Image: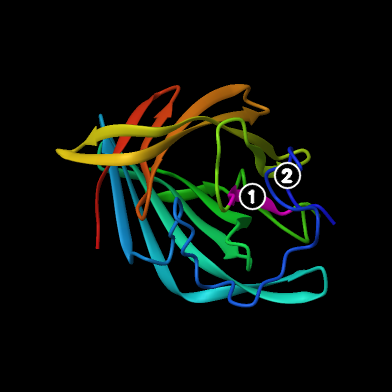
């Protein structure tokens, strides 16, 4: 079964094999290389933390223990969203996105869980977070969850240089994201061995400030 792919040339049609799903060392999305990463911009701050636990999914008869990442989003110092995101890497170095549990927060209280979804419960299509060797024109579906969200990604540029927070990154790729049902177009810059270094959203921009 083809999982979460728009262009067949991006990820092979054969079902992925997950021998070590918790080792995510994809060149452009090395999620397990860092314990904590942060992005800032305007009044926004996003903190991503790798948690010491996993979430099990069944994919094509395989039990896959996905990595759990917690994102906390702040608006002018106030926590507005907390998500638990689930990722796994297949043997060909494709990073799959298997869902998120979302807490939307207002005045310090969780008001709803809008945007939550999980593979195997809300969709039978696993999202592709990053293919193993992204090239200009490659396309994939980060999310494909009918009635909740769809995100289509496309590589628009490779080999870029980008100066972020006083640090020059090389061989950067630029990915366009088209998000439904909002109809929004967003962009992300990914750097080798780091991951996301800049996010351009309709409401503003956040940029990488460091990992530990």
Relative to 50, is 192 above or below?
Answer: above
Position in image of residue 55 (x %, y %): 60, 72
Using the image as rendered, state which of residue 79 and residue 170 is in the foreground: 170
Local SS, label 2:
loop
Taking the view exactly as shown, the residue that stands out farthest to the right is 1
Q: Nearer the viewer, residue 84 or 2?
A: 2
Kindly identify the residue that appears in the image at 68 percent across and 38 percent down.
149
Q: Nearer the viewer, residue 190 or 49?
A: 190
How far apart marks 1 and 2 lie (CA) works out to: 7 Å
Task: Tell whether 87 sits left or right of 123.
Answer: left
Q: State whether residue 54 is above or below residue 8.
A: below
Q: How is the structure coloured here?
A: rainbow
Q: Quadrant of the C terminus?
A: bottom left
Point out the stretch of residues depicted in magenta.
Answer: 126-131
Residue bearing the label numbered 2: 5
* Looking at the image, residue 70 lies above or below residue 210: below
């Amino acid at each position: 079964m083809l999982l979460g792919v728009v262009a067949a040339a991006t990820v092979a049609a054969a079902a992925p094999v997950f021998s070590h799903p918790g080792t995510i060392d994809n060149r452009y999305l090395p999620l397990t290389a860092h314990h904590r990463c942060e992005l800032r911009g305007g009044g926004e701050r996003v903190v991503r933390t790798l948690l010491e636990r996993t979430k099990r999914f069944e994919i094509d008869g395989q039990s896959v223990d996905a990595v759990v990442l917690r994102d906390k989003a702040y608006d002018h110092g106030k926590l507005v969203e907390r998500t638990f995101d689930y990722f796994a890497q297949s043997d060909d170095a494709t990073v799959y996105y298997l869902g998120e549990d979302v807490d939307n927060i207002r005045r310090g209280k969780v008001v709803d869980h809008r945007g939550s979804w999980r593979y195997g419960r809300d969709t039978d299509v696993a999202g592709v977070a990053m293919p193993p060797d992204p090239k200009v024109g490659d396309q994939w579906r980060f999310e494909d969850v009918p009635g909740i969200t769809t995100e289509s990604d496309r590589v628009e540029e490779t080999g870029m240089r980008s100066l972020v927070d006083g640090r020059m990154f090389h061989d950067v790729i630029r990915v366009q994201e088209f998000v439904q049902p909002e109809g929004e177009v967003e962009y992300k810059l990914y750097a080798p061995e780091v991951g996301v270094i800049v996010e351009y959203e309709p409401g503003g921009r956040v940029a990488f400030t460091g990992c530990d």
